[in-house]
Image (cartoon, helix red, strand yellow):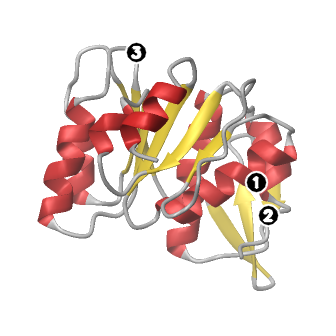
Amino acid sequence: MTASDIYQQCLDKQRIIFVGEGSGLIIRMVQYVLKFHQRKFDLSLPGQSPVLQADSPLIIIEAIDQLLDYKHHIVVFSDVGSSDDLKLFEQLANATPKGGTLLYPDLNAALKSMGSQERTDVQSIPYTRYKHELKDGKVILVSSTGERFPLNFGGDKNLEYVGAAKELVKKIGISSGQFYKAISTYLPA
């Protein structure tokens, strides 16, 4: 199924696309949080038939080509592989519609420069390595209120992707408390 086909079938859904080398892991985290809280969503992954439900309000798309054809509402950028990718990502960012959102890694200079550009009525949200501490060899997320949530995984990139997942699910109605409750039980594949 092409990007245009998915767009046509999902006209009434919020279309969220993920691009970049870390998109798969961010998607798995977001999926887990949404399933944990019994939220309905559609899913389109490369090389697989899309999972579409009539009553889901959004579709999560891992986009590797035809990026502009999805006509996204929200785009989540992760690591950029090449300068050609960066040019394509910039086109995608510039195609974000009024009222749309783009999330980008604050620790990647090229994507930060691209993501933080002023765009009319588009919300740009940076994400970064999530605040955490190490205790007895275990990674503990530290919330803005000082609450602590142990994770079943670690690593700087993974903690950066936790930041991306948290910012995204907040945009689609998952509270911080709900996010922490879910992500603290997540086990990476």
Q: Quadrant of the C terminus?
A: bottom right
The amino acid type of the residue labelled 1 equals Tyr
* SS at circle 1: helix
Q: Mark 2 — residue?
A: 186
The amino acid type of the residue labelled 3 equals Gly
* SS at circle 2: loop
The amino acid type of the residue labelled 2 equals Tyr
Q: Is residue 160 visible?
A: no
Foreground tag (1 vs 2): 1
Q: Mark 1 — residue?
A: 32
Q: Earlier in the sequence, mark 1 or mark 2?
A: 1
Q: Position of residue 172 (x, y in %)?
A: 63, 28
CA distance separating discs 1 and 2 = 7 Å
* SS at circle 3: loop
Q: Position of residue 45 (x, y in %)?
A: 54, 56
Q: Mark 3 — residue?
A: 99
* Side of 6 relative to 25 (left or right): left
Q: What residue lies at 43% left-to-right and 27% top-to-bottom?
A: 73
Report the front residue among 150 and 95: 95
CA distance separating discs 2 and 3 = 31 Å
